[in-house]
């Protein structure tokens, strides 16, 4: 083999694609080997229905995994919960207590984070109304610990993975500091070159929390509290609440220009608690100065 790779993934199913995409996020060069033709690729994942058991504690968690869930679906559905204890009990029951305890703990405790990460990679999830829900007294009720599946079943999931791995057109970062964005963007451009794609055709965007006030000292404590309570930061990424843009208008503009200076093309603002006054000051005082 003329070219050297950091990671070689044998297979093209859900686990294989997740491993490959995770390795790429860490900066590794990855080669995937799949023996089957495209129409049959994906191993067992292609020929299953795409259902996935995941811990969730109510409808808000389901809305995170299924952001296009309609209000009508919410009003007519009792999603219930599927707790970690229920998942552990099911693993013990199905395996007759032969499951590896360490791997089982990883599977259960990180199941929600794993599916949310897959969603961010382009896997669309939908409720399994067709075979995992019954309508009782006018409301759907799920059973068996299976509530969501990949849109399009197994084939849909594999096709989405392939698009994420092969035909991605850009890069979105979530709460990255300028130096972290620059590092990740350099990797993405390198992946494009290795895949035969012109890196200059790629687009990027940075999602950044912001709170504008009289000074950094006046707004920082409240912002850090909000970011700590309402937002998650994946251990495998460089996302951090320290990415927050804080201070008066001049200070915020200066911090945002640091992101533009390292190659950020578009900024997606996350205003403090989505307060109307924050949105107004960003629109009237921050954005015009970034355009000059």
Image (cartoon, helix red, strand yellow):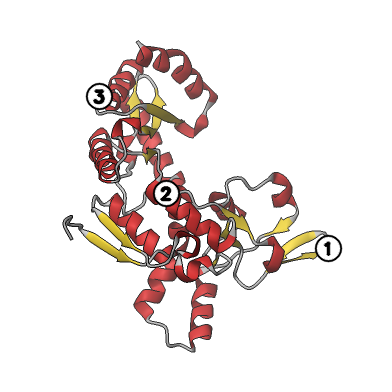
The residue located at (32%, 60%) in the rendering is 32
Does 75 appear above or below 178?
below
Q: Earlier in the sequence, mark 2 or mark 3?
A: 2
Give whichever of 9, 142 is nearer the camera: 9
**68 with respect to 158 (left or right):** right
Q: Quadrant of residue 14?
A: bottom left
Numbered badge on residue 137 = 1
Q: Residue furthest right?
A: 137
Q: Secondary structure at mark 2?
A: helix
- Quadrant (top left, top right, bottom left, bottom right) of the N terminus: bottom left
What distance separates the C-alpha of mark 3 from that of mark 1? 58 Å
**276 with respect to 258 (left or right):** right
What distance separates the C-alpha of mark 2 from that of mark 3? 27 Å
Q: Earlier in the sequence, mark 2 or mark 1?
A: 1
Q: Where does the image place residue 200, in percent across and percent down from the top left?
A: 30, 30
Q: Secondary structure at mark 3?
A: helix
The residue located at (45%, 64%) in the rendering is 41
Give whichever of 20, 179 is nearer the camera: 20
Crowding at mark 1 (Cα within 10 Å: few <14, some 14-19, many 20+): few
Q: Where does the image place residue 217, in percent across and percent down from the top left?
A: 31, 27
**34 with respect to 95 (left or right):** left
Q: Quadrant of residue 136?
A: bottom right
Q: Secondary structure at mark 1?
A: loop
Residue 53 appears in the figure: no
Crowding at mark 2 (Cα within 10 Å: few <14, some 14-19, many 20+): some
- Quadrant (top left, top right, bottom left, bottom right) of the C terminus: top left
Look at mark 2 in the image and give the residue it sits on: 164
Look at mark 3 in the image and give the residue it sits on: 261
Residue 122 appears in the figure: yes
């Amino acid at each position: 083999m003329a070219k050297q790779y950091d990671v070689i993934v044998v297979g093209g199913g859900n686990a294989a694609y997740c491993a490959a995409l995770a390795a790429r996020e860490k900066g590794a060069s990855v080669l995937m080997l799949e023996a089957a033709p495209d129409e049959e690729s994906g191993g067992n994942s292609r020929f299953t229905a795409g259902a996935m058991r995941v811990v969730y504690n109510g409808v808000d968690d389901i809305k995170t995994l299924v952001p296009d869930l309609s209000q009508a679906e919410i009003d007519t559905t009792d999603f219930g919960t599927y707790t970690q204890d229920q998942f552990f009990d099911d693993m013990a029951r199905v395996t007759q207590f032969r499951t590896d305890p360490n791997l089982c703990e990883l599977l259960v405790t990180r199941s929600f984070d794993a599916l949310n990460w897959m969603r961010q990679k382009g896997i669309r999830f939908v409720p399994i109304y067709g075979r995992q829900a019954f309508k009782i007294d006018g409301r759907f009720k799920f059973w068996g610990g299976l509530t969501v599946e990949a849109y399009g079943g197994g084939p849909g999931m594999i096709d989405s993975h392939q698009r994420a791995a092969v035909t991605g057109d850009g890069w979105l970062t979530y709460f990255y500091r300028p130096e972290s964005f620059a590092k990740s963007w350099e990797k993405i451009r390198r992946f494009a070159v290795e895949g035969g794609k012109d890196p200059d055709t790629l687009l990027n965007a940075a999602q950044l929390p912001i709170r504008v006030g009289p000074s950094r000292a006046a707004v920082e404590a409240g912002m850090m509290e909000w970011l700590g309570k309402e937002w998650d930061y994946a251990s495998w990424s460089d996302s951090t609440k320290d990415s927050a843009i804080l201070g008066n208008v001049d200070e915020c503009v200066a911090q945002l220009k640091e992101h533009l200076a390292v190659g950020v093309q578009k900024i997606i603002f996350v205003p403090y608690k989505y307060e109307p006054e924050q949105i107004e000051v960003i629109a009237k005082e921050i954005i015009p100065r970034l355009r000059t």
